[in-house]
Amino acid sequence: MGASLNVSLMKNNIKYNGVVTKEYNSITAENAMKFDALHPAENTFSWNDADYLVSFAQANNKRVHGHTLNWYMALPSWVTNFVGDSTAWENLLKTHIQTVVTYFKGKVKSWDVVNEAFNDDGTLRNSIWVQKLGTDYIARCFQYANQADPDAILFYNDYGHEYSAAKRTAIINMITGFKNRGIPIHGIGMQFHITYTQSDANISAAINSAAATGLKVHISELDIRLNTNLALGLSLTPALAEQQAARYTFIVKTYKAIPTAQQFGITTWNVGDGDSWIPNWQGAPDWPLPFDANYLRKPAYRGIIEGGK
Ligand code: G3I
């Protein structure tokens, strides 16, 4: 069971740090291992925040999942403004991936190699990477990572598996193609940023179709929104909290039913409701996580435990 972590809160909020230390055995950097954080200038790498998380994990016997080697967001301006031919762009991509994976070799055992490369309709996102490197850049990202650390477990990570069959199918087709080509891919990460109204059928379809690939399955960024109408005045009621708990239970139960060898883990996207990206992102209050703003267990926490029984 994992959580994505905010380094500043880990360093400065004793309750946050305490809950993380006690409750989770896997951590993901919410932002500290993204391109802009690690590689702020072409010849400058900045490891401090990531090293802090890795040191914390090692001191507390926790796993570190790396997020993310390639993404269309969180890019520093030197990349978005980079001028070069295709060879120069390929070298930029390879150098970043291989420098980062080599640096964390033996400490970070798994990576989101590529994040969010597809649109919800199943087409490939026309990102800077496609524009500069062509549609097969994804395969090369996995090859570069595997060359740097043959032992690393390499994931493709995305969102929407539970609401877009087209996207789910496109991702699974890519995975099938990679397996046929011998491209080293080992896991499928499903972010699962979902609403509490998402259906059992859609949740099951996402989890079971991911398991059918035979790859390791990571529910990688789980949070369950309650404010589906983006009502500015909505309050968290006991009824809503219990409905949220039931969704956490269903997700965990469904996940635990896939083959054990494929269960990489479930990671929530941050820890307490006050730290979630969602209220700011949606412009309305929400309470998507298992802990409240004071890091006290919500019914959702009990729901997760219930699902694991
Ligand atoms: O660190 C800078 C700070 O120096 C600056 O003063 C401040 C204001 O500009 O920005 C700070 O950086 C912000 C960063 O979070 C750290 O707080 C970025 O602007 C902001 O865009 C960034 O947002 C993150 C977002 O990814 C984009 O990287 C969210 O915290 C994070 O929760 C979100 O996580 C993503 C996953 O990586 C991929 N899946 C979707 C998920 C939610 O969007």
Image (cartoon, grey):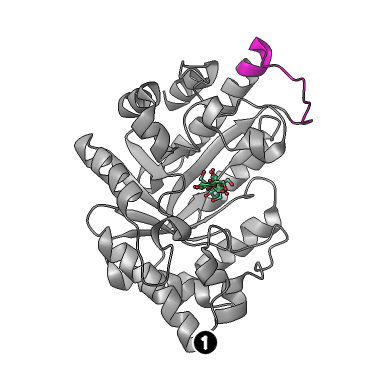
Q: Position of residue 301 (x, y in %)?
A: 48, 21
Query: Where is residue 117 drawn, in percent x and y?
Result: 59, 63
**Circle 1 is placed at which residue position?**
86
Side (left or right) of 61 relative to 190: left
- Whether residue 238 is visible: yes
Magenta segment: does it hold 237?
yes
85 lies above or below 205: below
Question: Where residue 208 sits: x, y (%)?
Answer: 54, 46
State yes or no: Cβ of the residue under disc 1 lies below 8 Å from any atom of ligand 1: no
Q: Nearer the viewer, residue 69 or 117?
A: 69
Q: Quadrant of residue 202?
A: top right
Residue 282, percent from left and from top: 70, 38
Above or below, 175 relative to 222 = below
Q: Residue furthest top?
A: 238
Q: Which residues are magenta?
A: 228-241
Crowd band around label 1 with a 10 angstrom C-alpha radius: few (<14), some (14–19), many (20+) = few
Quarter of the rendering occupied by the C terminus: top left
- Quadrant in which the N terminus appears: top left
> Judging from the image, what secondary structure is the residue with disc 1 in?
helix
Residue under the image location 70 percent in, 52 percent down: 164
- Disc 1 residue type (three-letter): Ser
Q: Is residue 180 visible?
A: no
Report the label total. Answer: 1
Q: Quadrant of residue 80?
A: bottom right
> Does the magenta-highlighted stretch encompass residue 148?
no
The main secondary structure of the magenta stretch is loop
Residue 87, above or below 172: below
